[in-house]
Amino acid sequence: MIKRIVVVAGWFLIASVPARAQIERPVVEITVSGRVSTVTGSPISGAAITVVGSKSATRTDSAGGFRLARVPNDVVTIEFHRLGYVPAMVTLNATNGTDTLFVQMLANTPTVDTFKVTATTNLLAGIVLDAQNQPVSGALVTLVGRKSLEMESGADGWFTFSVERPGPVVFRVKKPGFASLTESLRLDGVRGVVLHLLKPSANLTRIQKSDADGYNNRMVFVWHQTDHRMAVKSSRAAIVTREELAPLGAMPLGNAVRFTKSGRGAANFLTNQNNEACVLLDGYRPMGLTSLDIYRASDVEFVELYPPGSEMSGSLDGYLNITLCSDPFKKRDLRPYYAVVWMRLQN
């Protein structure tokens, strides 16, 4: 049995998969079971659950439990709907056997209800909680590359952003005394997120704690550069989110981005069979000319892809000069293919 805990609320979009996988469902099917609850752990009964592109559907029982039979053994999208809650969507890379999911949904707020009726843009709504599922107020939430859109979570831990353009979204959450958090997803319509800020280890030094909470000068500068770089990137560049990479598991990153909606266009410019690019790791560590395939999709939070000429800010030139990215054995474009790989933080 495979057990999986998915802390999720809102619209979770499926990562792009090959056309054959979208058209021809595998013969093998599995059973998916689990439980749907509020962020405080109360069961949500009567929630409608459906598998996109399949006839598999069910509802949660009085304890919030569910069991979905005949789920295709594939990358699938499972939708959760309940009156009074923000619809939820989970991307699942199903495998043979039974997969157990634990899903959290956010109750609608007056802000969300009003937005859905009156607005035509996109809404990101969320709540910031601590390790005990208590609201964290005053946490600074910043949408990176969206002209520094930011706000603090309220007394109830809630925050909302209205965004004009759909697409990949990267956001940072930080508060003194907590380890900073980075999340990435695709925003298209109304969706919610449940975020947990954790305390850093008590064994860290003062400098290490400053690194962890994101308030030291180096990380402030790095994220300032990242915000500007993502805001002015050309249309040929791409941001590939954790949400799209997660279902691809241990697939090498260079191959994985080709199977995502956000990254497949930019990945077409990776002409080298080894998927080489001029890599900057975590926004400040120059790796030089490196194969993206040394990284696994499951280990990456998000990746910025800049085909030659699409990095408009110039911020990467200082880290990755032409010497670091030169290749004496091949005729390469004088304008490098840049990739900024952001690794997931390990607990």
Image (tube, rainbow, N blue to C red):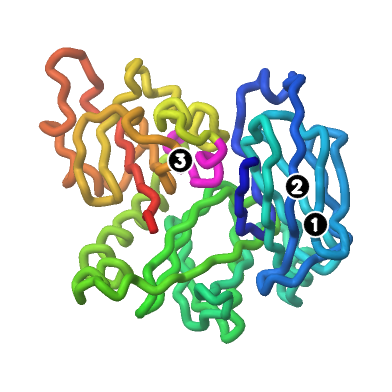
Q: Quadrant of residue 129?
A: bottom right
* Dots 2, 1 in contact, CB < 8 A: yes
Dot in front, 2 or 3: 2
If you read the primary sequence from the N terminus, does the residue marked by circle 2 or circle 3 appear first? Answer: 2
Q: Which residue is mark 2?
A: 33
Q: Amino acid at mark 3?
A: Ser
Q: Is residue 291 left or right of residue 37?
A: left
Label placed on residue 65 = 1
Residue at mark 3 to residue at mark 1: CA–CA distance: 28 Å
Label 1 residue SS: strand
Label 2 residue SS: strand
Q: Amino acid at mark 1?
A: Gly
Q: Identify whether 301 is placed above or below 107.
A: above
Please give the range of residues in magenta.
236-247
Q: Which residue is mark 3?
A: 298
**Within 10 angstroms of label 1, few (less than 14), some, or many (20 or more) residues?**
many
Q: Amino acid at mark 2?
A: Ser
If you read the primary sequence from the N terminus, does the residue marked by circle 3 or circle 1 appear first? Answer: 1
Residue at mark 2 to residue at mark 1: CA–CA distance: 7 Å
Question: Residue 190 appears at what percent x and percent y?
Answer: 70, 58
